[in-house]
Image (cartoon, rainbow, N blue to C red):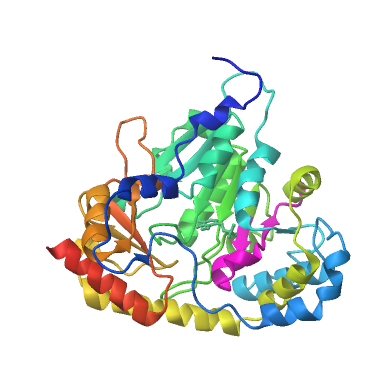
Amino acid sequence: MTTTMFNERLDQLPAYPFPRLAALLDGIEPGQSPLVMSIGEPQHEPPAMITEAMVKYASLWHKYPPGSGTPELRDAIKNWLDRRYNLPTDMIHRDDHVLPVAGTREALYLIATTVIPQDRPGPKPKVLLPNPFYQVYCGAAVLNDAEMVPLAAGPETGFLPDLDQIDTETLDTCSLFFLCSPANPQGAIASPEYLERIIGLSRKHDFVLAMDECYADIYDREPPIGALEICAKQGGNMDNLLVFHSLSKRSSAPGLRSGFVAGDAKIVKRFTALRSYCSATIPMPVMAASTALWNDDVHAEENRDLYRAKIDIAAEIFGNRFGFYRPPGGFFLWLDVGDGEAATKKIWKEAGVKVIPGSYLSITDKDGSNPGTQFIRIALVHDLATTREGLTRIAKALES
Ligand SMILES: Cc1ncc(COP(=O)(O)O)c(C=O)c1O
């Protein structure tokens, strides 16, 4: 049946991972009290400065917030970028290079609408993305009528796409390349050389590089290098690049819906224009809270320490079993359990812990292989005691 009422491209999207997980576990009784470690929703206490700002700026609820954010917020973001990445102060201009967004999820989707050519003759524009990937990249590609090209990011390539494996024709027809560093789910961090290479490719082949750096402030040992640091080394040239950052993970505030994009002024300008037609803006009191959060590094450090302590617990429990490694960035464990779906069911049935099969975060590529199949993802988002309890139960179920 054909209908003029629906966008049929929606039917081409894979089911979202969480309904798939619910269907997988449907009818299986959890063996112990349920504990959710499947979703990357930080449960640490959000900083008190959020509530303080909400109260202080409560009179601003009557205002339509400016689409480009307040100057104070853009200043706070610029200053954070300068501090975090040691950028020269004249590189990022708050009015040209920074755009606050109501969570990076919407921005990662809308960047595709902003940049993918719609009416160009010839082959469909391509969107390249790591496989496994944050699902929004896929929605952005498919719903904007691009060809999605998943690039395997398994252990053999250091959990990042192998840039040497991408042929020239693909790069020439690429419009948008999503890369996530630190990577969700594997925690891999792109090296300076890797970033230099991919930034170089974006300019040579004229595509937009969307660097999802949402986990930039959650790391085990070394602060992950950011793409803007490479630009700084190149005299501040940010052509073709946008970085995406969020307060959801850095400040344990996913409910705040606050993040930003920064980079190439031409793209920021077009993105701003598009967003005035369709985007949720950040409410004024939330902007005030966001300003306070970007201006403060102490809470982010405390947050990071907590994650590190949980990785210590995981190391103690898993040792060198199930392919355990300390994720260099982010807060997920990516365990090699042979069959991720079977392990997920077993863990739920015996341990009452909800994890997610790796294959729900990845896709089967043209060669018929799916780099997520053998893995499960565990989100270390709870307090220390709950995390220890959950991981102990998971290990026991996997051992039996
Ligand atoms: C890799 C990655 N990018 C982006 C997001 C979106 O974050 P938010 O929309 O909360 O800023 C998430 C959230 O889980 C994520 O894991």
Q: Is residue 310 magenta?
A: no
Q: Which residues are magenta?
A: 243-266
* Residue 291 visible at all: yes
Asked where in the image residue 365 lies, by quadrant, the reply is top left
Quadrant location, the C terminus: bottom left
* Residue 274 visible at all: no
What is the tally of numbered marks visible in this picture? Answer: 0
As rendered, which of 210 and 259 lies closer to the eye? 259
Residue visible at 49% across and 34% down? Answer: 13
Q: Give how far across and how far down residue 207 sits, in percent.
A: 61, 39
Q: Give how far across and how far down residue 160 sits, in percent.
A: 40, 52
Residue visible at 45% across and 39% down? Answer: 15
Left or right of 69? Residue 395 is left
Left or right of 9? Residue 157 is left
Residue visible at 44% across and 33% down? Answer: 167
As rendered, which of 128 and 15 lies closer to the eye? 15
- Ligand 1, seen in the image, is in the quarter at bottom right
371 vs 10: above or below: below
Q: Is residue 258 magenta?
A: yes
Quadrant location, the N terminus: top right
Left or right of 157? Residue 169 is right
